[in-house]
Image (tube, helix red, strand yellow):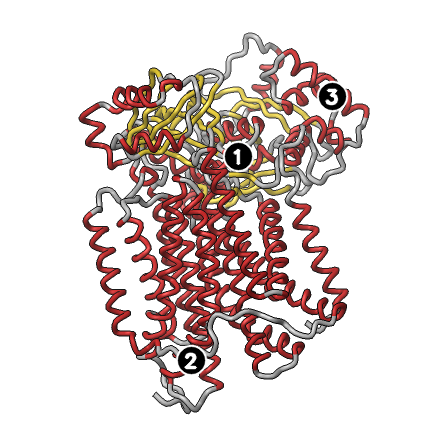
Amino acid sequence: MNKPVLTRIIIVLIVIAIFAWSMFPLHQQNFYKVLSELADNNPNIVKVIDLAKEKQAHDPNLYESVAVDEAAKELNIDMADYLAVKDVLTNADVLRYVRSKCASSIKLGLDLNGGTEFDVSVIPNKPANDADKAAIEGITISELRNRVMEILRNRINKSGLVEPEIAAEGSSRISLKIPVSTEEQKKEYMKLIQMSAQLEFRLVAANNDQLLSEYNSNPQTFVPPVGLEKMTMVSSDRFGKKRTDTVFVQIHPEMSGTNIINAFVSADQYGQRQIALQFNSEGAEQFGKVTAANVGRRLAIVLDGTLYSAPTIQSAIYGGNASITGDFSQEEAQNVATALACGNLPATIRIDSTFDTAPTLGREAVNSGMIAGILGLLVVALFMLIYYMKAGLVANIALIVNIILIMGAMASLGATLTLPGIAGIILTMGMAVDANVLIFERIREELEAKKTLLNAIDIGYKRAFATILDSNVTTLIVALVLYWQGTGPVKGFGATLSIGIISSIFTAVFVTRLIFDIYNKYFHIKGLKMLRVFHNSKVQFLSIWKYCITISAVLMLASVVIVIVRHNTILSVDFTGGTQVMVNFKNYVSQSNIEEALKKAGFESSVSYKYSPVEGNKMEIVLTGKNQNAVKESGAMATITQMLNKEFPNAQFTGGTETTIGGFVGAEFAKSAIIAILLSMVGIFIYVSLRFEFTYSIAAIIALMHDLIIGTGVLLAFDRQITLTVIAALLTVAGYSVNDTIIVFDRIRENLKLRKDITYKEIINLSINQTLSRTVITSFLTFLVVLMLLLFGGVSINSFALVMIAGIIVGTYSSIFVASPLIAYRHKKIIGIRE
């Protein structure tokens, strides 16, 4: 902190500028305009654009990128020559790069912005050989569909932080929803979804040159020998010049790509793209045998019926590695690598229809949720300004910087912002304010000890730093494990929370200290006035620990009883699936109004809208498992259509279909989420044990479990269900709980070194009292933000806000009345400290 103020100002301004720049553009850009600007308005590129516009005028359904591609081919223009961009080698690369530049910086998820739904059918493949026949024997169409769902989920997740929704429809259909923002992205995902990724290694005919000569002499009448077929491949030499080769390959492969465990894009010795493959031990052994037995022969690499390369086997290859070379664009190579790494589809995928979907939370819920979040942050900023005065202004500046850094980082990483992501941002905002409160309260203590303002600020930051680091690192452990092991919304939550924690530490420790130094250097402040809630409090918290433990035990037991009583109805349609009713409509009706009307009629549901130029306007109603008996007795579609037309006659609901659907959360998703939570607890346990002692880590985990169990119990007591957004709220509560507990532990550790004149229990009481002001203020401010979400956020995020409020209250309570008493009566004895 002794670096010159000007140097630190420059560093902070550069960091803010970089992240602020990353936030733009906030909206989708014009494809033609971006292409023209990237090429500096080169006349040849302008010709391509003009011709593309003409083509699009004749065919309005033509995508801009497709029109440009066709125009460039027609004019024989290599657009890569006019863009000085690394790794842009072909026209396909140019189109991919321009698409990425056109996209808005921050992608919104299905719940906030809608996207595209692909309705697909799963068609079993006919077995090509006895091995394939044995592999699929005894597998039902539903089991095959489930396997395809997991492969597709992995493919989409590997393409980035996209957070798709995938659900089974009937026995052989799948609904796949992706937050796609452009027609170009929709086209790319269609390719990725339909790619079978059937990789085969086939031998080229030993007399290929002779067969090729016979074919060239009379191609019309030439018939390949039995067991062989003619295939062609397009390749590029080191100078980018294309050529077409014809080879005759065996129809039956020597081996398939089923044993591939990894695939990624790399470059060969000439800088050309290739897809590197890694086999498991079985695949490596098989590949070694094939290459050893055919040294000197050419081995054709065929993917989904297309020949990509046919290199000559120079020697046996036992390392378990291979590669596919070909005329790939970067995007094509990445899609192929992703598909191969996730496994080949055991069936053919047919996309039956596509729909543009409205936000699943509803337009009103999104708007009200955003307004509620902004109101909450404004209330926090106002409180900080009133309570901490000049220091509060410093905290508010840091809060604005924090938001810029978080949004800029999310844009740079291509993360998708969803409601769980907003939950992570809310938590990090609370933690950012918490760090400032910790520092300010420390400065207050030093000022009361008659230190000068400069010394008080310096000592306050030094003493608060260890606490800020410990509390944030434990939460960061949770966030990183969730990102590493989680999928979908859980992974997105982990990414947002990780970014927020790092940003909060930077703004709280570095930015606010810089502002104080600027104050001192240029404005010569003489004091920091602050209001006070608690002054020298001496509450004997441990004297009532038995009553508190009893209350906690009763609440936890009640929560468990509620879970047992409601065991069949605690999970939402996200997990259990339900009945999907699809009806046509003429006039739009608010989703929240539809859901409220259905609730009055006894149907728990989620409602969303989707649109298609072919299928027309559709309203999708998903009835949860709680309604299944009523559905079976009455017939959902007829009952609901009749009731809604009576309630909303202007909507004119007609026709429709009724289908049983599976949950959005697959078995692999649930498994990865559970593993992530367990690993998070292990990480917290290890870190707290190393930084404090074994008993402290046990107490922190018990307090964490206490908060999660009671938070879940409160939700279920209000007759709510566990949804994906509730899972996000519970994860947020976990982070908040650990953060709160560690702050108390940190002050206890400090006082154990400073106070040898009082007992261990008195030190714990003293530490809780010393951090009481910070605990109450931080909890109150976070509570205010979430209360705004509960009051003004709408029906769709009501359960999320309810869990958060319960978690904040219980988390604050447990750090004082659960974790602290546990270490008071079970700890390692310290020399010089009386029991």
N-term-proximal mark, 1 vs 2: 1
Mark positioned earlier in the residue sequence (1 or 3): 3
Above or below, comparing residue 596 to residue 680 in the picture: above
Q: Residue at label 1?
A: 336
Say few, some or many: other residues with alpha carbon within 10 Å of mark 1 (under 14 / 14 to 19 / 20 or more): many
What's the distance in space between the residues labelled 3 and 2, CA to CA?
75 Å
Q: Residue 472 in the image: x percent, y percent?
A: 50, 64
The residue where tag 2 is placed is 766
Rendered position, 242 above or below 680: above
Residue 86 visible in image: yes
Residue 145 visible (yes or no): no
Q: Residue at x 61, y 22 (%)?
A: 63
| C-alpha gap between disc 1 and disc 3 | 29 Å
Residue shown at the point (76%, 32%) measured from the top left? 37
- Give the class, few, some or many, for how many residues have Cα within 10 Å of label 3's Cα (few <14, many ≥20): many
Q: Which mark is residue 48?
A: 3
**703 vs 774, nearest the viewer:** 774
**Residue ID at (35%, 33%):** 606
**Type of amino acid at the residue the image marks with label 3:** Val
Viewer-nearest of discs 3 and 2: 2
Relative placement, left or right, of 343 versus 221 is left
**Amino acid tagged 2:** Leu
* Lower position in the chain sequence, tag 3 or tag 2: 3
Residue 796 at x, y percent in the picture: 40, 39
Residue 713, horizontal then vertical, whole percent: 28, 53
